[in-house]
Amino acid sequence: MYFPQEEYEARWDRLLDAMTARDLDWALVWGRSGGTFERYQDILYLANYYSSQSGHEYDSEEWMGISFSALLIGRDDVPELVVDEPDYPPDLLPLPPERVTWHKNVILGAAKMVKGRGITRLGLVGTDFLPVKYARVLEAELPGVEFVEADDLVRRIRRHKSPRELDCYREVGENVSAAMDELMKVVVKGGATQAEAAAAGTAELMRRGGIPHMVPVSSGPTLFRHCGDPLLGFSPEVRMEPGDLVRTWIYGPVWQGYWSDPGRTAVAGGNGTSRQRELIEKANEIVIKLMEEIRPGKKLIEVIQLGNKLRAETGTEDDQPGKMWPIYGHGVGLFWEDPWLLADSTDETSVFHEGQTYSTEVFLYWPDVGSAGVEQNFIVWEGGNELLTTSDLTWW
């Protein structure tokens, strides 16, 4: 395991405290992995489990819940985990072997964990992705149990990173920045396909022990879309011709399951026009100013208002990415995390905290010039934020 046993025990204690605050004695935490990176987080955080099976590859009464897993936690015992994969390496789990059970039908296995414990009220984490079919089986097996929706229970404690997690994030920054550097070298050289640029960044990331969720590359005829190809993220056919604006991201669980998502925009094959450079520089400036504005105790709404002001001053319009993400940043962790800097937010109370792993980003679009997008990841500190994504912002 990357993290020591005591790190997981501390996480269980924090979760139990959060459960007590909600008057929950027990919680059943669901996860889905098996080739997807969008709902694995809570189980990885609590039990370091990730299935290698392909989700939904087969489903019947005997085999149900492939790629799913569930952890039962309560005050009176060590957490118990039901998994979809047999013979999982015990040295990768913080739980003793007798507390980990493989079950062909993970849903029935989860119900079996709950039965016999006298549980009448159960916090259910994962209602936003647990299939209706599975939920109905669970309810039928546990007719005397009141299920309490608690999807944000683990997410909330995940926002606050331990010192070990922050050290992990420094490695995250090194790895993804090196990958972005390799990608951008291909971009600025010009003449390569979007796929070749994405491959260069991905190869460096994988060499370092990480993997992307997606590497969107947009240029030329695809510039005004988030991805060069919706399925791949990049186009194998579109070449980044000299003079093309190129907007690219690398995002995903780039190290130990922790996410990073730096974004850069450059001109293929050279310096580009003065208007192209101006558009990129304005995006860079907004991201930097917003990052510098963030400090522990600062209200999110104040940063949002500044973002709205700075963005309006550029005279930008909205293309597809701007419409998809009307934001100026968000938390990062085992996925993109709350709280988000939503452009239309009315939240007057939320504030940043010390040691928060966060991002600032912006999308700008001038119809006569093109589209630019930029994002930085960093750790929030009182004396000045610690930049994690150190790849250059300008590439001319």
Image (cartoon, rainbow, N blue to C red):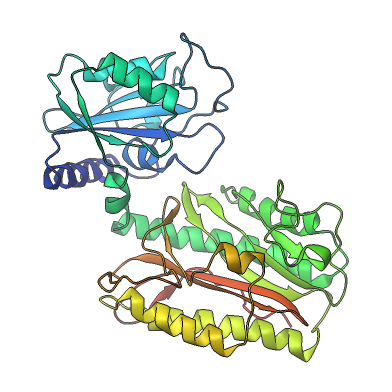
Residue 101 seen in the figure: no
Q: Determine whether 109 is above or below 380 in the image.
A: above
Q: Determine whether 390 is above or below 132 in the image.
A: below
Say which residue appears at 55% left-offset and 52% top-offset.
252
Residue 197 seen in the figure: yes
Toward the viewer: 111 or 240? 111
Q: Determine whether 264 is above or below 130 in the image.
A: below
Please state if 321 lies on the left or on the right of 151 as rendered. Answer: right
Query: In which quarter of the view is residue 299 placed?
Result: bottom left
Please state if 95 lies on the left or on the right of 361 as rendered. Answer: left
Toward the viewer: 9 or 111? 111
* Residue 231 rendering spot, x and y as whole percentages: 71, 46
In the picture, which quadrant includes the N terminus?
Answer: top left
* Residue 274 rendering spot, x and y as whole percentages: 77, 91
Q: Determine whether 329 is above or below 73 in the image.
A: below
* Residue 326 rendering spot, x and y as whole percentages: 52, 69
In the picture, which quadrant includes the C terminus?
Answer: bottom right
Say which residue appears at 27% left-offset and 45% top-offset.
153
Toward the viewer: 162 or 28? 28
Please state if 173 lies on the left or on the right of 164 as rendered. Answer: right
* Residue 378 rendering spot, x and y as whole percentages: 44, 70
Say which residue appears at 12% left-offset and 48% top-offset.
21
Query: In which quarter of the view is residue 380 placed?
Result: bottom left
Which residue is most to the top?
62
Count of all numbered marks drawn on residues in the image: 0
Say which residue appears at 59% left-offset and 51% top-offset.
208
Please state if 194 lies on the left or on the right of 98 as rendered. Answer: right
